[in-house]
Image (spheres, coloured by chain):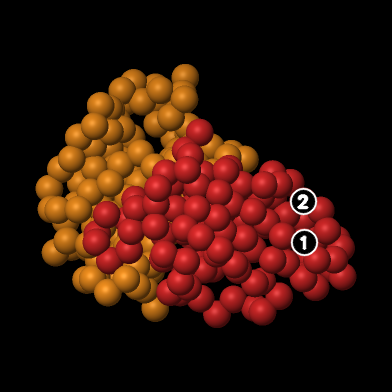
Chain colours: A red, B orange
C-alpha cells in the first residue's frame, strides 16, 4: 500500500461509453500524474498536475480528459475510446515539482479494456 | 527526443549471485534518477533513488550514477527468487521550473534461477 488508491481496478467499456477513473492520494503530495502502460511499451506520461494546475499534457487525444479538483484527487474522464486505448492506467503522486524531490509513488492501476 | 534506454532482457542470474541492471539516458540536465520494480500484473514500486554521482547502497541494492557518461545502474547482491521482476529505470528530465517529466525506460526483465 503506497498511499495512492485507484478505482476501479478493472474496467471494461464499449467505444461509445463514458467512464471515469479515480485516483486519491493520502500522502500530502502536491503533484499528481497519469501514466499509460501498454504491453511492450514504456510507461507513457499523459498528464501532470501541480497544486491542481495542469503543467504537462503530452499531446494526449481529447478523448482523455483529466480533472484535478484538489491536490488529493485526480480523475481521468474517458469517452469514445478506441480498442488501442486498452492498457493499464496508473496514477502517481510526488511531493512537489521543480525541487528535485520527485520520487513518484504509484497506485495499483486500472486495467482498462475497450471493446 | 529525450529517452531512457534499457536492455529488455530477460536477464537470468543464479540465486545468490549479483544481478547488474543498466540504464542510459539522453538528457544531460537530468537531476534525479530512480529504479522501480514491477511484478507482473502489479504497479511499479520505488526501490531506489539517486541524485549525485557515485554509489548509493540500501540493503542488497546499490545504485550507481555517472552523469558524465549518462549512465545509471542497479546492483542486486545475493539475488533471491523474489527479485524476479521487471526493473524500470526512470529519469527526471527537467530542471527547476516545475516542468518535471519523469520518463521511464521499457524495463529489464530479471529472472533469478533457483
Crowding at label 2, few (<14), some or many (≥20) Cα neighbours within 10 Å?
Answer: some
Chain letter for mark 2, please: A
Task: State whether residue A94 is above or below residue B26.
Answer: above
- The answer to whether residue B34 of the structure is visible from this angle is yes
Viewport quadrant of the N terminus of chain B: bottom left
Place of residue A2 in the rendered image (x, y in percent of width and height, measured from the top left): 47, 38
Cα–Cα gap, marks 1 and 2: 9 Å
**Marks 1 and 2: same chain?**
yes
Q: In the displayed structure, does residue B32 sit left or right of residue A2?
A: left
Residue at image point 14% right, 64% down: B68
The foreground one among B34 and A96 is: A96
Tag 1–tag 2 contact (CB < 8 Å): yes
At horizontal 47% and vertical 66% (from top left) the residue drawn is A52
Sequence-first disc among 1 and 2: 2
Secondary structure type for disc 2: strand
Local packing at callout 1 (Cα closer than 10 Å; few below 14, some 14-19, many 20+) is: some
Q: Which residue is mark 1?
A: A19
Q: Chain of mark 1?
A: A
Q: Position of residue A57 (x, y in %)?
A: 51, 76
Q: At 55% across and 64% down in the image, what residue appears?
A: A68
Q: Which mark is residue B38?
A: none
Horizontal side of residue A83 vs A7, given as left or right: right
Q: Which residue is mark 2?
A: A11
Amino acid at each position: 500500500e503506497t498511499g495512492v488508491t485507484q478505482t476501479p481496478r478493472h474496467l471494461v467499456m464499449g467505444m461509445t461509453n463514458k467512464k471515469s477513473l479515480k485516483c486519491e492520494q493520502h500522502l500530502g503530495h502536491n503533484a499528481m500524474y497519469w501514466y499509460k502502460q501498454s504491453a511492450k511499451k514504456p510507461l507513457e506520461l499523459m498528464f501532470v498536475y501541480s497544486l491542481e494546475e495542469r503543467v504537462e499534457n503530452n499531446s494526449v487525444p481529447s478523448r482523455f480528459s483529466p480533472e484535478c479538483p484538489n491536490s488529493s484527487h485526480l480523475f481521468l474522464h474517458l469517452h469514445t475510446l478506441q480498442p488501442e486505448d486498452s492498457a493499464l492506467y496508473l496514477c502517481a503522486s510526488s511531493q512537489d515539482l521543480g525541487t528535485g524531490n520527485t520520487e513518484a509513488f504509484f497506485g495499483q492501476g486500472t486495467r482498462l479494456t475497450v471493446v | 527526443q529525450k529517452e531512457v534506454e534499457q536492455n529488455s532482457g530477460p536477464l537470468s542470474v543464479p540465486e545468490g549471485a549479483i544481478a547488474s541492471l543498466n540504464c542510459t539516458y539522453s538528457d544531460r540536465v537530468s537531476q534525479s534518477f530512480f529504479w522501480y520494480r514491477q511484478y507482473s500484473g502489479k504497479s511499479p514500486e520505488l526501490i531506489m533513488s539517486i541524485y549525485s554521482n557515485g554509489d548509493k547502497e540500501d540493503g542488497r541494492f546499490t545504485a550507481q550514477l555517472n552523469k558524465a557518461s549518462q549512465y545509471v545502474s542497479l546492483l542486486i547482491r545475493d539475488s533471491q527468487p523474489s527479485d524476479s521482476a521487471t526493473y524500470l529505470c526512470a529519469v527526471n528530465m527537467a530542471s527547476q521550473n516545475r516542468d518535471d517529466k519523469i520518463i521511464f525506460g521499457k524495463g529489464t526483465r530479471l529472472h533469478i534461477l533457483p
